Image: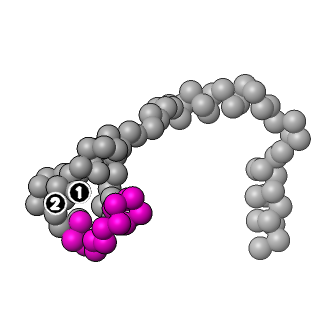
Amino acid sequence: MNDIVKVYEENLKQFGYRRITKYLKEDYGIKYNSKKVLRIMRDNQIQSEYVRKMRRKMKYKQNKEKSLLQYPDLINRKFNDIKTRFSVLY
């Protein structure tokens, strides 16, 4: 248990159970089952702390208005005409 806590604190509390087992095996030569490491972490309430990437909050209305201004209808599409053509055939 002390080895797991030591590895966890050495790596700034950013390692999860998978990385801790790999680190113990490669650097210390200690073989632990990953399930055992996970169970020990749960019992001692150790959980990795990840830094999440900040997301931008965009408003749909603003983007829609900007896109209409930036991209005018250059082809002059007429969707209403297509509906009337197909309605005549059927």
Residue topped by disc 2: 1
Residue 56 x, y percent position in the rendering: 49, 32
Magenta-drawn segment: 23-37
Question: Could you tell whether 11 is left or right of 64 in the image?
Answer: left
Circle 1/circle 2 CB separation < 8 Å = yes
Residue topped by disc 1: 4
How many residues crowd mark 1 within 10 Å: few (<14), some (14–19), many (20+)?
Answer: many
Q: Residue at x 77, y 73 (%)?
A: 90
Residue 77 x, y percent position in the rendering: 84, 45
51 shown above or below 27: above
Residue 40 x, y percent position in the rendering: 16, 63
Instruction: Answer whether residue 36 is magenta in the image.
Output: yes
Image quadrant where one finds the N terminus = bottom left
Q: Is mark 1 on a helix, strand or loop?
A: helix
54 shown above or below 28: above
Instruction: Answer whether residue 28 is magenta in the image.
Output: yes
